Amino acid sequence: MANPSAGDAATESLRKRNTPLRVNSKEDARRAVLELNALEEKEVKDDKDRKTFGRTPGGTVFTVPYTHDMVSQLLSPTEPKNLSDICVLLILLIHVLLAWFLPSTARKPVLATIFLCWRAGYNIGIGYLLHMQSHHKLLVRWARKSKLFPAASNGENPHPKLRAFLKREFETKIPKDYNFDTAPLEYNTWLLFRRLVDLILMCDFTTYMLFAIACAHTPASESVFVTLLRWLAGIALFVFNIWVKLDAHRVVKDFAWYWGDFFYLIDQELTFDGVFEMAPHPMYSIGYAGYYGASLMAASYKVLFISIIAHAAQFAFLVLVESPHIERTYSSPPPRRAINELPAVAQTDKSPTDHSSTAEIWPHPAHAQPSQTHNLLGLHNVDLYRTTDTAVFLLQLYLIALTVLTPNTRPYQTLFVVNATICRIWYSVGIGYLLNRQSEKKKWTRHFLKYGESTGEAWRQWKGIYHLSMTLCYSSFVAAAWKMYHIPSNWDGGMALPKHVIGLGLIALQIWVSFSIYDSLGEFGWFFGDFFFDHSSKLTYGGIYRFLNNPERVLGTAGVWGIALITSSKAMFCLALLSHTLSLTFIQFVERPHMQKLYGRSLRQDAGLVKSLRRSLPPPLREWQDGMDKMLGEAFDVIEDMIDAAKPKLTAGVTSIVEDTKSLLPKSTHRLSLTKNEADLAGLNPKDYELQIEGTPASALAESQRSSDRESEQARLPAERTNSFKPLLFEYGAPIKVKWTAPMNHSKRDWVGLYMVSDNNSREVTRLSSSGRWIATNRDEYEILQSEVGIISSDIKSSKITENGEAKECLTGEMLFSGDKLWWTQGVFEFRYHHNGKHNVMAISLPFEVRIPRFGEDDLSLESNITLSTPVPPHQDALIRHTIEKILLPIVQNCFDRDPDIAPRTVSEAFGSLVDRDGKYAKRVVYVIHQMFGIEFAPEVVKADGKVENLAWRIWEAKKVLAPFSMSKSRGPGTPIEGSN
């Protein structure tokens, strides 16, 4: 057996001595942390004794000490207290005393204002700090720059007393496995951030409870039974809230509770059970049930509304801060997908005159057509050029006009309810029947194949009729509700206000469920694509389906019940009951049989929520539930057998009817400060500053197109030059290297920005923000991490020859502008060197132009007797596409920032997955195609095609289709005129 490596010995030493270990790479650090945590998990220990290991972004592996939760460390008498704990407790006591001594008239508004301020400190304040830490490592960079944590003995720490205070505070709270002097900077910064979080969260909770207590009362007309019921429900929700928080903390511990992964990472295998199987983001969703429990106990709408505001702010915090960070940190890009794998052309299909090289260049276009892209759902996908969207728009317009312009009399109310009923029956029964026939006999697809159409056309028509039916069903339901609704005359008493609040909550729940289902299934699953195409036989449960097998079974009609509750109409309640019943019937008799046929035993029996609830039931109830499930399953089987027996007669009648009718919201880092001559400019000579640029030269075609035959006769001649200067013309999207020269005493906060030449009228001061297109000359001078992206070298000592011929010492550096630091348009640009973080200009580079060449027939290898408007021979067709591919590949690589994870190396390699997630890449490509070939595509086309060769095919086909409408000059025969032979 081989001896253990040095790395293994080092990691074992880390387990024993808690000394941070620096490894060679991030991947080695990740592997070491996984191994160390796996070894600890195998040992039988208490949580307090089991060590956890983490790693910093720089690759330092260290022991993460055990810490206590917020409430325990503040309120438990067994936990040691320090000065910061006492300060937090004093602030909480001040809030309690304030609530006690405030006059009754001012108590509620003052406490509400204080709570909203602390809530803003949570969601806006902490949210901003975490956002900046996630994107720019702001807090860690601040700690490094302020030198809070280095040892004071070597003179590196300018704040020795503050450092001693922090050391005493941290080591008092963490007596085991922690050393302030050797702990990584990221971990110490996180501990300091924790103290701020403790203060804000405890004050947030305390002021909320004080406000709820201040608003608590018993309504005068409330019976004892209702009071008892209200308190029992409120206490149940509050206790459930506490259990959710405790169980979530059991799983994620302090590391995730305090957003530790914004500072360092812990790699280990976690089991997300318990509350994490019940709902997505349980700490932010069901973890706020206590708010509504407190509202019930207080019997106050003020508490309810402020709870809704706070809960909505927490969801905004989740969407804007946490979810993007989780996506960047834990969602590693999947491998490149295989898009439109084209079948090889069989040798037997080739004619004797075929050129083998042509077949290798491009397969037959009938097999190579890329997938179509033009989604139906979403306002951003509405296209009135499309028949379905126009029909939906006109029907909605007609329905709105009919609803608003007709009186709310009994006959019209009846008419609208009947109309909504018919639409719902068609949406559930009619569409369900069509899907059932498609599942059993592919009847929908066969109908279109019968008339020579493709399966793609059948799919498009199906999506259209389903989309039309769905929008008509829900819009007619809303129209009926509008007719049945009456504005309450008294909002203060009775159930009017709670009905509206609960109803709007149910509507919001259904909208969220619909978005979650669409996010999980996509356009294909939303329109039941697996009824029409052979899809992957592997069934995965992600998104909302991780918690529920059929979220639409109950939650999918929550909004319908919400509208019925708001209207308080018996007719709407009956319509809601019908809608829910038909929805369950559709799932049971259409979706479920097809899923069983398609996926068989891979179907999951119990979802995460059901598992959690079943585990919480006592054994007798669990056995009773199993018996009920068995009885219901047998009952459904009997009903299905009865329907199967009657199916031939029903099918014959319905089929004859069908056959007879034959009728479907920059990132940009803005830096703008208008400055005049600064005092620190004294002694600096702009002649000592210089900028030189290097870039990828544009093609000869782009250079030749700078002049054309549109100028005067004299201007068409080549311009005479008196020197050897050549204008700088760079390729679109290619990185540009900037070399700067500055005097020895230049400011470390100098920076270089990229601008359009026409954007500034002054050569001394820049009066326009750089919009993120800037790079600092030196590292660690700005809090924003993006300021350092692109730095190659800084402050390299050198010398330059002055105008007097003398050698003078200077400092030089290099930086690379690429990706988001470039302009993604054509134009003339320049770089500007700025002084000391201001906008005083010390040097300006030579102007340079970015130009995209325009390709016409002459540039696409067309033979002299061939034009776009005439049929192109197959061999010439393939060669032209090959030419387009060669033209397109380098420019697409530039559009993808030359990132090896997403940019294709060959024309047949698929784009990386980030192209689908970040729309800027596709927008760059369609802009290039428009400028190069005069063809305007939607960004979704780039995402759907996924390869350069597919884009080239699409461009060439579009050029041929649009050729008869082109106004460009043709080399072919002219239009015949009268009298010609």
Image: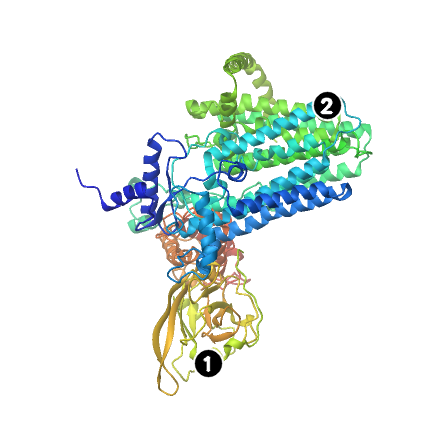
Q: Residues within 10 Å of mark 2 (few under 14, many from 20)?
A: few
254 lies above or below 642: below
The residue at 35%/85% (across/down) is 806
Q: For residue 208, which numbered disc appears in the image?
A: none
Figure check: 69 above or below 605? below
Scheme of image coloration: rainbow
Residue furthest toward the bottom? 804
In the rendered structure, which amino acid carries the disc numbered 1? Asn
Amino acid type for the residue under numbered disc 2: Val
User: Which image quarter holds the N terminus?
Assistant: top left
Q: Toward the viewer: 893 or 971?
A: 893
> Where is residue 616 shown, x and y percent of the image?
51, 22
CB contact under 8 Å: marks 2 and 1: no
At numbered mark 2, what does the secondary structure look like: helix, strand or loop?
helix
Looking at the picture, tell me which residue is in the foreground, 735 or 535: 735
Residue visible at 23% across and 46% down in the picture? 6
Left or right of 244, for residue 176: left
Q: Residue at x 57, y 45 (%)?
A: 88
Question: Which residue is denoted by mark 2 in the rendering?
Answer: 226
**Residue under circle 1?**
685
Q: Residues within 10 Å of mark 1 (few under 14, many from 20)?
A: few
- Counting residues from the start of the chain, the first of labels 2 and 1 encountered is 2
Front-lying residue, 421 or 672: 672
Q: Quadrant of residue 402?
A: top right
